[in-house]
Image (cartoon, rainbow, N blue to C red):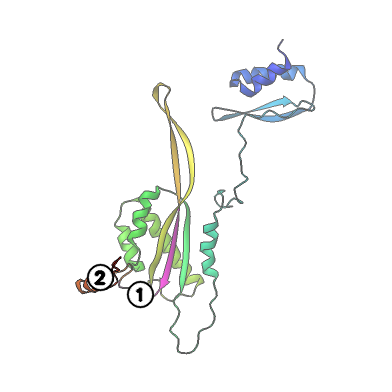
Amino acid sequence: MMSLKNLCRLLRHGSLQTRLLATESLGSRLSSSAINQSVVCCGSSVNQSTHKLSGCRQFHTSIPRNDENESMPDPETGWPKLKEEKEWLDYNKIVYPPQKPGDPKRPAEICHLRKHIKYSPKKLWYHTLMIRGMSVDEAIKQLSFQKHKGAHIIKETIEECQEIAVKDHNVEFKSNMWVEDSFMKQSAIVKGFRIMGRGRGSRVRYRYVHYFLRLREGKPPKHYYPPPETGYEKMENYIKDQRKRRIFLAL
């Protein structure tokens, strides 16, 4: 007959069949209240009824999770909330002071985001840069021509932001807006393991992305980025640089 110490060792480190035999042997030897225990092995859980030892801890086969540095999880997805997400949506709550008579009308700005997108950040980065400075209709048109998954996700996000602008921010025409800011940020990375032939394996990383969007009321600017300098502007800048030169060890 095996000792109690060896039975506990089999329950913690043995295979599934060995654990079942050890559980039956332990249950026949101990007489106390039965509890439900989940035995996890190779991704499958088997509910077993074991007896609880007085003064001993329960048997656990899963690794405890360290959640000291995580915030409260998102109720929608169950993922930890990031600080940038909350700050980004707080821009919609800003209340500006009343304007004076004769001042130009302050255009509305609407911020929106799409969280935890299962997509590569490097692939989504191209689409986020493409629509910067475009009108909403032109951005939707250009994204609809793309065959990539990320382009259609950004298109849906823009359409959602249009509905929010008309419904909650008193924007008169949903097409009278342009993309003021569009960028992405790396979200959580879920690590997995791919089993290959001949006992080999490799680590797999499933990356998730947050997409941030800001629409501004009005017509888009002529140049979103600084325009390239003309020949005369380059000549003037060259002359200024030459006049600013300092010749060391001179009179």
Say if residue 23 shows up in the picture.
Answer: no
- Span of residues in magenta: 210-222
Residue 98 vertical placement versus 221 (above, below): below
Q: Main secondary structure of the magenta part?
A: strand
In-image side of 178 versus 21 (left or right): left
Q: Nearer the viewer, residue 26 or 199?
A: 199
In-image side of 181 versus 145 (left or right): right
Question: Farthest residue toward the left?
Answer: 231
In-image side of 49 versus 17 (left or right): right
The residue type indicated by label 2 comes to Gln
Q: Which label's residue is closer to the chain start, 2 or 1?
A: 1
Q: Nearer the viewer, residue 96 or 138?
A: 96
Q: Position of residue 216 (x, y in %)?
A: 42, 71
Kindly identify which residue carries mark 2.
242
Q: Position of residue 173 (x, y in %)?
A: 41, 75
Cα–Cα span, label 2 and label 1: 40 Å
Q: Nearer the viewer, residue 177 or 229?
A: 229
Q: Residue at x 45, y 86 (%)?
A: 103
Q: Residue at x 53, y 77 (%)?
A: 96
Describe the element under mark 2 as helix, strand or loop.
helix
Kindly identify which residue carries mark 1.
219
Q: Position of residue 153 (x, y in %)?
A: 40, 55
The residue type indicated by label 1 comes to Lys
